[in-house]
Amino acid sequence: MSQLFEYFVVCGIGPEIRTLDGEKGFHGTGVFYLASLLDQYPPPTHTLYPPPPPQLPTCVLPAGVEFYTTGFDSSNPLSFPRSYPIVLTEGDGSKIYVSCIAFRDPVCEDIAEAYRIPTNSFADKCICLVSRAPSFHILREVLEKIHQLCFSSNGSSKPLWDVISYTVSNVPLPTPGKGRVLFAIENSLLSVDFPPKDGLPHADISFQPLVQCLDVDNFIKLFTAVLIERRVLLRSDKYSLLTLASEAICHLIYPFRWQHVYIPLLFFSGVDYIDAPTPYMMGLHSGVDTTGLSMDGVVVVDLEHNCIMSSEEIPPIPEPEMSCLRSEILKLLHPNVVWIDSMKADLESYEQYSRFNTKAWSPDHDVQLRIIFLKFFASILGGYRNFIENTANQVFNTQAFLKKRSRATHQPIDEMVTQFLESQGFLDYLERGLGSGENSSNLVDKLQDAIGRGQNPLSILPSASAEPEIITISDPGLGISGSGARYTYDRFPSNYRSQDQEEKRKQILAAASGALEYAAKHTPSSPSVYADGDSKGESLSPRERAAERERMVLDIKVKLQGLWLRLLKLGATDDPLSSFEYGTILALIEIDAEGIGGSGFVECIREHIHSGWKGHLTEEQFTAVKELLKTAITRATSRNDIATIRDALEVSAEMYKKDRNNVADYVQRHLRSLSIWEELRFWDVYFEYLMECFSNKSTNYAALVTAQLIILATHMAGLGLPDTDSWYIIETIAGKNNIGYSHIIKLRGYMSHIQQLCVGYWGVYSVKSGSVGMGLLPSPRPQDASSAIGIGIDNQQPAEASGRSWVQSMFTRDTTTLRTNSSFTRVRKWTSDQGTITCHPLLLAPPKFYANLLVILC
């Protein structure tokens, strides 16, 4: 018998700490970190069913993990545990239902020690129950009981993980419409049952939150947008509301199914997926900034403020269905208003509706609402079965059906109905129904027949069966403890780790700790650089101090050279990001307040290139070097170290990996997210540096200036700066140097050409938005965002392709797809009438090549 629960999972901060931007290590509070899968039951070694989706930790903690100085505080609502559901969608369209409770938990001592995290710190942790059954209520109840049992002062009679393992392993799925399962967690009795299969699909949610957030007109508008498969983005500051509203809409379009991208709760760093060209339904926390994203055609539904916005008109539902649907919903939600002018004595239905709606919202209201929409489909698709052809050319004769409907309603062919009949949801509905027997007809067919016979629409639902069969699951170990001891916890306990797991954890923590210790000992600002302590340092003369510092600088550079060469020699099976070499270089760059680590690292690369190295990197090396350069440039920016930034930019244009078309993809293109490139002051200083370097190579001043500006323009194109921003900088510098219109025209033409090459090969660059509005969280859109959920945007399909093709598998369990891809590589080839054009060789040449254009310009 299948089990109700598939997994119990714990997510939070693991032994390898990394920020959402990919930077290793602890960077203090106020920074968001990537979540890791910490524990699970059944363990990873089992073979009962596939492992949890690898993106689960990112999805259950959408904002990432944050560190805190305090834990739960009864006077601070922000510290309270949060309970919410999420729904994951696999590549085949099947859903995984997850109930989550997020709370602040103490940071493990070994992690705090390895990363120098202040003692008594707390971090977000999330416990989850994973199931294939949409049993939201029971998933939440079980999870809350486990959470309460862990932190109860009374404790439990068994170790907590014993309680978890028994519950996950022994609670079966009940037989739909026939069975009920009873089970207990400690002293709490719980039950679960499923409705009959021949009725409405199981929807263990309340539809009340959705109808309370939106008025009737906006409610119908949202329903219409989903039905004709628009791009729909729900916004709310409540995780649960986003998931419940999305699920409610999916049930209200029954018997049709949403065929496209479906992410009820989008993790914050995945905000770039709003730019997806295909239909989708996504939910995004209202605190995430979407400034800079293209929202053309997106239907934005603000659940907090009852507001729907879209740049494209949503066609209205035609008459008479619109009036009927609106009236039926109003009767359900506001019966006293609908019937207020009617005479009670002559209207029996008034009392019926009044009695029904004086009660609090109940599952009966949910059924009534679903029947209302089912009646809408029965009406708008009246007689559709006569137009099913299933021929080689078409499945459904859409034009004949529309003409028949137009004659019956005395109205022209309706746009909304036309779009609906052309949707993938309708086509899927027809294909599922082809070949089915009369006894297996769906509820729309049954309802059309019942209405034709004058029967009550509720008669199509299965009648209540006899008393369900009760299956009781008893825990033989419950309450049995030899000494009567109780198990209490001050934090959520870890599950048992195997020897291999424990050893791997120790290695990761040792590498992190070793990198920090090494960096601390070899940083010039550290007192430990003096053999006899601070007293000796204070006794040194200025000349001796200078000599001591030079020795330390040389020592750091020598060690960096060794670490750099070993990083490049790691085997194909090694992960540079987890290596000691990477961790130590990163620590030297981050901790060194004087910038010796960052400048020394860049100098190592430059010397290696000058020695004859061709700059070719493997995929893994490319990612590691890219992250190290990002960190070095960020630290240099904070110190206003323009020289190091300039050198890092130049070496980044020399190092590359080969993409799938065997074309060089340079590191420089992946540094776009850094803010320094938007500052005119940097390019001003860089221009002056170039003028000094090349001042003795030409007597033609205008040509010399133009040549240096070409070098700047090439770097800007390599970074992916928008053409308007690049031209503003170039034009400003050119204006300061009075080079004349002829050279400015050449510059404009060159920049237009190189921008065209960039767009042709890499596609339109995503617009960088780092702005933070009042009360908004920053838009955390790393340039490698596609790796967060295993989507290769390189494989983006045309706009008419299905959403599932574009996503491939939004939550695939195939971990081999989790490769780092650049979000710039949206289009790898540019197809023209003459064929496929790859990148122009000029675009791939190092920037110093363009200095040779001086001869041409002269």
Image (cartoon, rainbow, N blue to C red):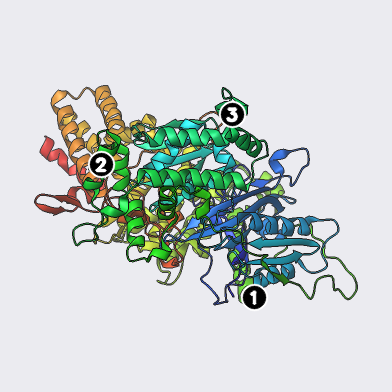
Dot 2 falls on a residue whose secondary structure is helix
* For the residues bearing labels 2 and 3, Cβ distance under 8 angstroms: no
The quarter of the rendered structure image containing the N terminus is: bottom right
Of the image marks 2 and 1, the number of the one nearer the N terminus: 1
Q: Which amino acid does label 1 sit on?
A: Ser
Q: From this viewpoint, which residue is outermost toward the left?
A: 834
Residue 276 position within the rendered picture, expressed as x and y whole percent measured from the top left? 36, 46
Q: What element carries label 3?
A: helix
305 or 820, nearer to the observer: 305
Q: Closer to the camera: disc 1 or disc 3? A: 3
Sequence order check, earlier mark of 2 and 3: 3
Q: Label 1, label 3: how many angstroms apart (C-alpha)? A: 75 Å
Q: Is residue 639 above or below residue 828?
A: above
Q: What residue type is labelled 3?
A: Asp
Which residue is label 3 attached to?
346
Q: Residues within 10 Å of mark 1 (few under 14, many from 20)?
A: few
Sequence order check, earlier mark of 1 and 3: 3
View extreme (right): residue: 483
List the residue tagged with mark 2: 714
| Circle 2 or circle 3, nearest the eye | 3
Q: Please identify, in this view, whether the residue under mark 2 or under mark 1 is nearer the observer.
A: 1
Q: Label 2, label 3: how many angstroms apart (C-alpha)?
A: 83 Å
Is residue 308 in view?
yes
Q: Where does the image place residue 168, in percent across and percent down from the top left? A: 65, 68
Q: Which quadrant is home to the C terminus?
A: top left
- Kindly check if marks 1 and 3 are in contact, taking CB atoms under 8 A apart as contact: no
Q: Mark 1 points at which residue?
A: 498
Going 35% across and 42% down the picture, which residue do you hit?
Answer: 766
Give amino acid for label 2.
Answer: Thr
Indicate left or right for 433 with 201 as reference. left
